[in-house]
Amino acid sequence: MFDAVNSLLAFIVAISILVAVHEYGHYIVGRWSGMKVLRFSIGFGKPIWTRVGAGEDRTEYCISAIPLGGYVRFLDAREGPVAPRDVGRAFNQRPIPARILVLLAGPLFNFLFAILAYWALFVYGVPTMRPAIGDVEPGSVAAQAGLEQGDRIIAVGDVETEDWESALVAMLDGIVSDGRVSLRLLDTDGGQRSAEINVAGEAGRLTEPGMLFEGLGFDPWQPPAVVGEVTPDGAAKLAGIEKGDRIVSVDGVSIRNFAELRDLVAARPGKDVSIEIDRGTERQRLDVIIGSVEQDGSTIGQLGVGAEQNTRDYFYLRKYGAIESIGRATERMWQSAVFTLRMLGRMVTGDVSIKNISGPINIAQFAGASAQAGISNFLGFLAIVSISLGVLNLLPLPVLDGGQIVYQLVELFKGSPMSERAQILGQQVGIFALLLLMSFAFYNDIARILS
């Protein structure tokens, strides 16, 4: 129950911030362009809070009941007569370049917000895991390519990869292009070598959510389940577990890394379990009574051990100066925007699974998880969603900014507005396409919950 409420609140906060940024772009550029703004609303439906601005325009600023979007309403002569003092200030009475600029401003502000978010993260410093190979399944595509546990991916094709995000984007790009992923690897002895993964014809399956690593046959590297520290008076200390012990299994369940150990222990608060450890060349079996601790309103198990710190530089703090961070943040935003657009195009052609389309339920779950993980994770989540919002709004659908820009361009070259019939037909097509997209999104959300 707590997680659901947390996810809902995080989702509302996230959507409200991003919608406010998007609509503020339309609003402020519209005012700069000499347009009269009648209403600025965060949310749809009936306003639950309204303030009327000072000055002659008397703009209404609203928070409305349905927190799933927002809008800026400009004075428009097509909707009714314009008062003499406002002639020339209606949206459709301003020059076409000004209208296009106003329509572009919403997505542009989303991109600027993402740059600002990434800039803050890079200046503050983000703990980052380098892209390294964990367990490799025998006989898998990864094994056939020669990947080994501990290998670090330092480049995919011509793209240098400092973190998993850049590595995954480059790998997915290769998979959907021709099915070949060229890797440059750094092994545990410091030597470099090349490898190529060939998954031609498998793009649809591998781009389904959660299928990439399973399909390739390897896991991302995680700290091994080697005890680096033991909490005094904790369950591990009482059972005789020592620093340097490698935990092999819990109640017969094999442990491959520290994350799996943490998950197994968390699910067994207060339980009496059998733990196998490797101590030097000897394997021992110890009986342990798992401790417990209250966290986020629930009781979870706690062993009282920490991972060893000798992780061969797999983790690092990604941090840059204030000036350098501007370029880094802009580059990250651009890469993400191009990747999002490319994936959308591949979905249309059927090369990428449409199961990647997420709806509000899935986004809310991600929002809640990122909010619980800390402000840095939540800020990174906002940057990614802001970029997606910007890209989606530039699509040439009449109900989106991109479609309205197309209308303005047609009027510019035609010399007159499109006919009312053509505009209505375009709106109907756009609404149908949007409803179809939303149907896929909700279906995917429900399918993920049921699975």
Image (tube, rainbow, N blue to C red):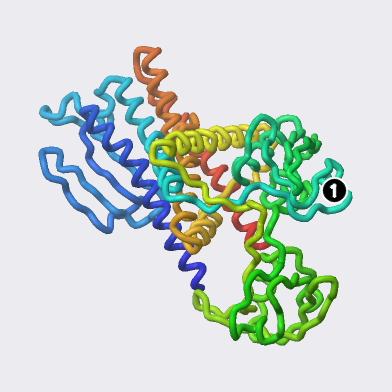
**248 vs 188: above or below:** below
Q: Judge the density around disc 1: few (<14), some (14-19), many (≥20) Cα neighbours within 10 Å.
A: some
Name the residue type under label 1. Ser
Q: Residue at x 22, y 40 (%)?
A: 38
Q: Residue at x 20, y 34 (%)?
A: 36
- Residue 167 drawn at (x, y percent): 64, 41
Q: Residue at x 84, y 43 (%)?
A: 146
Q: Residue furthest right?
A: 139
Camera-side residue of 413 and 266: 266
Camera-side residue of 147 and 366: 147
- Residue 125 drawn at (x, y percent): 47, 50
Q: Which residue is mark 1?
A: 140
Camera-side residue of 376 and 378: 376
- Residue 63 drawn at (x, y percent): 29, 54
Q: Quadrant of the C terminus?
A: bottom right
- Residue 427 drawn at (x, y percent): 45, 33
Quarter residue 110 falls in: top left
Q: Residue at x 50, y 61 (%)?
A: 373
| Helix, strand or loop status at disc 1 | loop
